Amino acid sequence: MKKLTLFVLLFSLFVGSTTLVAQNKIELNAAAAEQTEELRKQLKFSDAQRDQVYEVCKEYQAAYRTLSVDLQANKEWKAKIDTRFENKLASILTDEQFNHYKKMQQTIE
């Protein structure tokens, strides 16, 4: 009886954690899609670029979610994430598109 109870408990924990992982992945994909769409509206990139930008946005969203609530404590880590994101965007976008992106970022900051 104890083995059955333990098995049921472990199984429910596994199912619960799998559900959380799936939910987090859905949220991450939705955030990346929204970020990509906002960039597409402003930068007017091609469908091929969109797919590449989406992948970069997914990476960015995943890395950004590792930051704690206290962004000040993670200032250096956030700067690294942002720099990596910009470097990858620069390799995907045209010079004109990337310059427009940089101008957009300056108005935000």
Image (cartoon, helix red, strand yellow):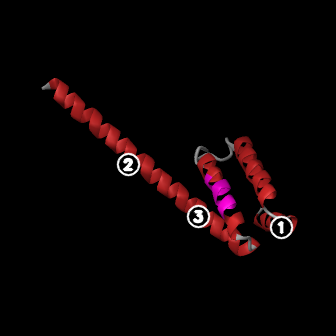
Q: Position of residue 7 (x, y in %)?
A: 23, 31
Q: Where is residue 69 in the image (x, y as percent from the top left)?
A: 58, 47
Q: How crowded is mark 2: few (under 14 residues within 10 Å), some or many (20 or more)?
A: few
Viewer-proximal residue among 55 and 10: 55
Q: Give the range drawn in magenta.
A: 51-58
> Looking at the picture, which amino acid does disc 1 mark?
Lys
Could you tell me which secondary element the residue under label 1 belongs to?
helix
Residue that sits furthest to the front in the current view: 48
Check contact, mark 1 vs mark 3: CB within 8 A: no
Left or right: 17 as drawn, with respect to 36: left
Instruction: Give the residue pinned by disc 1.
Output: 103
- Residue 36 at x, y percent in the picture: 65, 65
What is the crowding at mark 3: few (fewer than 14 residues within 10 Å), some, or many (at least 20)? some
Residue extending farthest to the left is 1
Q: Quadrant of residue 42?
A: bottom right
**Callout in the foreground (1, 3):** 3
Q: In which quarter of the image is the C terminus?
A: bottom right
Mark 1 or mark 2: whose residue is earlier in sequence:
2
Q: Which residue position is annotated with label 3?
A: 33
Relative vertical location of residue 98 with respect to residue 91 in this rendering, above or below: below
Q: Distance between the residues labelled 1 and 2?
A: 40 Å
Sequence order check, earlier mark of 3 and 2: 2
Amino acid under label 2? Thr
Give the Cα separation between the discs numbered 1 and 3: 22 Å
**Is 77 situated above or below 32?**
above
Say which residue label 2 marks.
19
- Magenta segment's dominant SS is helix
Quadrant of the rendered image containing residue 97:
bottom right
The nearer-to-camera label among 1 and 2 is 2
Q: What amino acid type should be assigned to the residue bearing mark 3?
A: Ala
Q: Distance between the residues labelled 3 and 2?
A: 21 Å
Look at 50% across and 57% down and name the residue there. Answer: 27
